[in-house]
Image (cartoon, grey):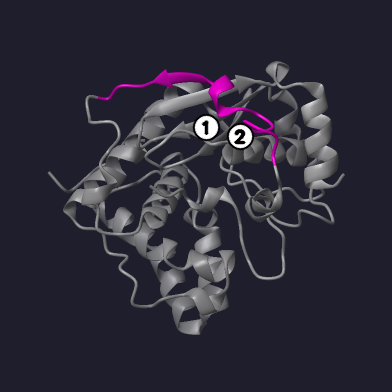
Amino acid sequence: MAVVSMMSETDDRLGGDERKTAVTTVVRRIKDVTQPRGGYINPKSMAMIQLDDGRPSPLDHKVENIHASLVGMAVDYLTRLATGADPQEAFAISIRGAASIGRAELATAEAEVASLVAGKVDSYAILSACKLAGYDVGYRVGPTMYNPDARTKPDRITTDHIAAMVERSLAFFRSYGPVTLGGFTFPGGYSDVVTAGDGDFLTTDTLWDFKVSVSGPTKDHTLQVLMYLLMGLRSGQPEFESVTHLGVFNPRLNTVYRIALADVPADVVATVSRDVIGY
């Protein structure tokens, strides 16, 4: 599905994780965990593949006019939309966030989502996505953190960057896809310790997390994807059973990072399952 730009995350997308008051999410749990030196999975152990689309890598976040987290969420949700997801599914977290903030915000969010079309990403969709991503904080953190005056309207350069990153994401999936599951949660896979969380994408053999940042993955990111896989397997969803690799794709850097599960020591998997997730 082509991304049409009508114009000529230093920060991540909040870790691909749902955050709200009185729950412990994957990202929040990771912040409380003291990992061994280098991490449970050292990011340096991941294979790195640099992709090339003729544009600069990284795309310069300093010239963008909205917060990096909004850019990252917009890229994530628009990629889901571009790959054919129903707009209601692609922007589900935004709708939940708006609902927690107020009736007026929910009505606005629902109208924005209703105007979007699965498989179509143009400058209007990018504008809507940035506006909708602004509501996410109501669900991920809490409605009191919503700032109605926050800048959510991307300028020409920011719109062009978002379009380019969605294009990179689609090119990535043409090489590493197809997507078998997107925007997944883990019903039956949560624990008394970790009670919420949502992942980005699954392909046949890899669980992927998208990071729209100016640097490569960290030990927190590698722990995050391992936790997602273990929780997915515990949830019983069949799509997780064929996963043999963990991966991170960064469309700002246009770089793929990937590691085989066979290269993750069994004792690390057991420790994360027991001591981090709480199974």
Task: Kindly tell me whether residue 181 is visible in this rendering.
Answer: no
Query: Disc 2 marks which residue?
Result: 222
Sort mark 1 into few (<14), some (14-19) or many (20+) by Cα contacts within 10 Å.
many
| Disc 2 residue type (three-letter) | Thr
Query: Disc 1 marks which residue?
Result: 248
Would residue 266 be found to the left or right of residue 175 on screen? right
Q: Pinpoint residue 59: horizontal percent, then vertical percent.
A: 27, 38
Sort mark 2 into few (<14), some (14-19) or many (20+) by Cα contacts within 10 Å.
many
Give the quadrant of the C terminus.
Answer: top right
| Disc 1 residue type (three-letter) | Val
Magenta region includes residue 27: no
Would residue 115 be found to the left or right of residue 157 on screen? right
Tally of numbered discs: 2
Q: Pinpoint residue 165: horizontal percent, then vertical percent.
A: 33, 39
Query: Going 68% across and 34% down the picture, which residue do you hit?
Result: 226
Q: Is 141 drawn above or below residue 226 in the view shown?
A: below
Element under disc 1: strand
Q: Pinpoint residue 11: horizontal percent, then vertical percent.
A: 42, 50
